[in-house]
Every structure is written in C-alpha cells, then in structure tokens.
Image (cartoon, rainbow, N blue to C red):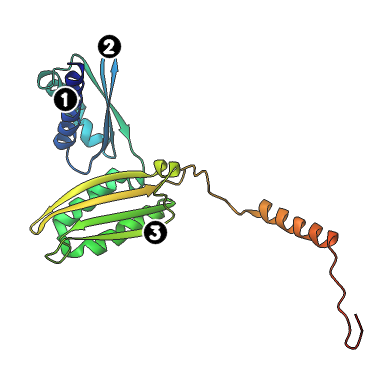
Amino acid sequence: MEEKKFVKFKQDELGIKEYIKSSLGKGRISDVSIEYTPVGEKIIIATNRPGLVIGRKGEKIDELTYVLRKRFNLDNPHIDIKEITNEALDAQLVADSIAIQIERKGSLKFKIIAYKTLESIMRSGALGAELALSGKLPSERAKTWRFTKGYLKKTGDPSKVVNKAIAQAKTPMGVVGIKVSILPPDAHIHDLIKVNDFMLNNIRQNSIVHEEIIPKKKSRKKGESK
C-alpha cells in the first residue's frame, strides 16, 4: 500500500513539473524542483527569462499558483525564480534551443545548427561538450549524428559532474531526439593533471639532480683497449 502511495506521489510531482514547463513555454525552463516545508510547497523554477515567467506585476505567477492549488491540490504553493545567467552552459536550455531551431529551420540544416551551438558552448568556457541528434536526418533512414569538442567524461564518478539533458523536435519526417552533455568550466575532475610552471620547474630540478648523481660514462677513443 505504501508503495502505491509513493508511486502516486511521484506521478503527481512529475505532472506538476510537466505542466509548469509546458505552460511557460519550451526553451524557457531549465529545471523545476519541489521542496516540501512545514508551511507549504516551495517550487523552484530555473529559467533564463525570469521576466517572461513572472509576467507583468506577477500575473503569471498568480495564475500558476491558482492552478497548482485547484488542479494539483497543493495546500500553499510558493514559487521561487532562479535565474540562469549563462544559458549556453545549461544543457536543458541548449537542448530545447536546438529542438526549436530544427522545428523552425527544418531538419536539413541540423549540421549548421549543431556546429554553431557547439561553438557557443565552448566560447562560454565549457571544458567539453557533445551533441547527439537521432532521427531521419536528413535521409529516410534513422541515424545518430554526434558533434563533440573538448574534454568530456563518460564513465565513472567524474562523469557525474557532466550536465546532461534531452529534448525532442517534431519535424515532417518524424521526431528527432536530442541529447546534450556539457562539462562546465568549474567542474572538479579528480584525475585531471594540470601541467603548470611549478610542475615544470620541479621536473627540471629533479632531472638536474639525477644527472649529478649518475654521471655520464666517458666515451672511449678509437684504438683503446677495454
């Protein structure tokens, strides 16, 4: 019985997140998280367009709060806005942006869209990025195209710091799946070795000490016997 309640609880939570994303528009919302407090439900919306989400004098927030109370039976929902300053480093916003561009410009220009997006991500300071587009691009047979640049971890604990997201673009040829992986500039990588001036100086000093301890053998002249 408790398992069914937990599943129902998660379904309702997912329904709230999907409703908020669809009502506020594709490409504007990165993430929606819900925190449960003694005074009510705290809903945090991460977006790159806080003004459009809030609306004039907070009218969209008031409307969204009303729907959350009536439709989803929340007691006291409180909405907080978290602004994303650099949308090129947010995987979900990048994936939604690619989907919108493919839907508007057509699937034939997917390579131009992917390369421009990849350049924008790297210019923003990302350590690495990968874009994977799957679908009928541009032929009638489905295929996966990958666009990569920089350094990107895919396995092990270091891969957990990679920002990942998925999106879909609906085209006349069918649905195009989009996967975006971004390694942010401030990511901590455990096995990354940075070769700086301090390390180079230590290597030079160690090599000099090694040469002094182990002198070079004198070369014999021609004609000398062993």
Q: How far across and how far down the image is residue 88, in percent? A: 34, 48
Q: Quadrant of the N terminus?
A: top left
Q: Are marks 2 and 1 in contact (CB under 8 Å)?
A: no
The C terminus lies in quadrant: bottom right
Look at the numbered discs 3 and 1 and tell me whether their residues touch, using CB distance below 8 Å.
no
In the rendered image, residue 174, in percent from the top left (x then y), is placed at 10, 56
Q: Amino acid at mark 1?
A: Asp
Element on which disc 2 rests: loop
User: Splitting the image into 4 quarters, where does residue 78 fall?
Assistant: top left
Kindly identify the residue that appears in the image at 62 percent across and 53 percent down: 196
Instruction: List the residue tagged with mark 1.
Output: 12
In front here: 224 or 137? 224
- Number of numbered labels in the structure image: 3
Q: Tell me the tag on residue 28.
A: none
For the view shown, which residue lies furthest in the left direction? Answer: 172
Q: Earlier in the sequence, mark 3 or mark 1?
A: 1
The residue depicted at 32 percent of the width and 44 percent of the height is 164
- Which numbered disc flags the more N-terminal residue, 3 or 2? 2
Percent of width and height locating residue 171: 11, 56
**Relative to 50, 141 lies left or right:** left
Q: Which residue is mark 3?
A: 149
Amino acid marked by disc 3: Lys
Q: Compute the Cα span from label 3 to label 2.
A: 46 Å
User: Mark 1: few, some, or many residues within 10 Å (few <14, many ≥20)?
Assistant: some
Which residue is tagged 2? 39
Above or below, 159 against 73 in this view is below
Q: Nearer the viewer, residue 98 or 85?
A: 98
* Amino acid type, callout 2: Val
Please tell me how crowded label 3 is: few (under 14), some (14-19), or many (20+) other residues with Cα within 10 Å.
some
Outermost top residue: 38
Looking at the image, is mark 2 or mark 1 nearer the viewer? Answer: 1
